[in-house]
Image (tube, grey):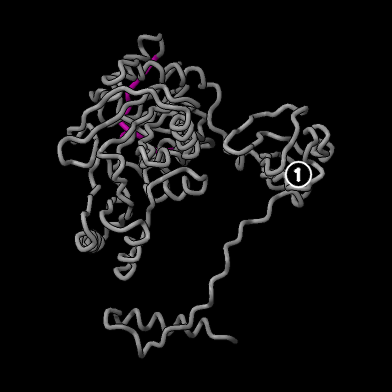
Amino acid sequence: MKLAILSRAPRSYSTQRLRTAATERGHKAKVLDTLRFAIDLAGDEPDLMYRGKPVSNYDAVLPRIGASITYFGLAVVRQMEQMDVYTPNTSAGIGNSRDKLRASQILSRHNIGMPATMFVRERADVLPAIEAVGGAPVVVKLLEGTQGIGVILAPDTKVAEAVIETLHSTRQNVLIQRFVAESKGRDIRALVLGDRVVAAMRRSAKGDEFRSNVHRGGTTEAIELDEEYQRVAVQAAQIMGLRVAGVDMLEGDDGPLVMEVNSSPGLEGIESATGFDIAGAIIDYVANQVSFPELDVRQRLTVSTGYGVAEILVREGSDMVGRSIDDSGLRSRDIVVLTLNRGTSVIPNPRGSRDLEAEDRLLCFGRLEDMRDLVPERRRRRSRPRMQPLDPETIPDEFTTSDSEALREANAQDAPN
């Protein structure tokens, strides 16, 4: 296997360990400076230049992209994906995990436990947001930050409002998050590789520090995770689109609470704590998966065929309940079942003899028109009472002139024809 390691820090512990592990296993590994690439869009097919020369063929790439070069780094990974170079962490997955707000939005859609979180921008919305997450103390987080940087514990409401107002004044976007007191300054880092957790450690904050990051002086100890924590860690990483990830979780009263999914987890702390050769495990995983580069189904399917992927719900009372997949009538309609979701379990490529149950969700491939009547209705929220337009003459003093004009325009557009 010929492996490219994208890194701006060739001498860092993690980069060195990955390169050494690859070399020891007989692979060719090269560390490439992410910023020295040029993306060639002029040719007949996707291509890259490195230091002014065409990039040779690589079988796989391991992105170690820092927050400061996220945009350009993702562009390089995307180009390699178009060149069918295998990467365990897709450009979309890295982008999802790097933005804390986007990551939280995605995880919340899949019922992953997280600390209560709010995102607001206007000053008037800050206090209700603090109350919505359970009141002070609260944690204020910058949307982009690593190693505990940009994470602030506000002990009371006034301090929280002041911190948020200051950050907003510098055009910073922040999350307001419930402080999970029961975690007692500790968290769990689970190293996910593919569909399993290969190592885990508990990090404990030093002294009065509430952030448990090793870079903040936190201490570490190897631990064995129970099945629930392992399941949540793997599910969170895979939902993000990551096959190599560090999943940080708090130990809440009701179970694991995911704080962050890291697409470039540092290896030094967890290898030291566990004594496990994580770098070697990553290289072995990549070598085993290198023949299966990420496929964008939307790019592979042409619109004219009328085929696509859809999720089908087995409704209570449906003729499919109690019948096997073979007897459900799906195959006769040229619908192929790719996976079966039952509760928190996912059954890939289910056998035709498997019986279906109510509330099963089937990920299927077939003609879209034939699946239309089987697709579940979109979830609808309860409608809220229509709010009366604001009278511009009664606008509070904190509104600016431009705000007033915007309200007049909105009211005019909202008026009945």
Which amino acid type is marked by label 1?
A: Arg
In the image, the segment drawn in magenta is 28-40
Whole-percent x, y for residue 179 in the image: 30, 49
Q: Residue at x 79, y 46 (%)?
A: 318
Task: State the residue in front, 346 or 316.
Answer: 316
Mark 1 — residue? 367
Residue 161 showing in the rendered view: yes
Whole-percent x, y for residue 167 in the image: 23, 59
Label 1: element kind: strand
Q: Residue at x 46, y 80 (%)?
A: 410
Q: Residue at x 68, y 39 (%)?
A: 362
Q: For mark 1, does the 10 Å Cα neighbourhood hold few (<14), some (14 to 19), or many (20 or more) residues?
A: some
Q: Is residue 198 magenta?
A: no
Residue 52 showing in the rendered view: no
Judged left or right of residue 201, residue 96 is right
Chief secondary structure of the magenta portion: strand
On screen, 403 above or below 181? below
Whole-percent x, y for residue 415 in the image: 53, 85
Seen as rendered, the residue at the extreme bottom is: 393
Q: Residue at x 42, y 35 (%)?
A: 77
Whole-percent x, y for residue 52 in the image: 34, 32
Q: Is residue 37 magenta?
A: yes
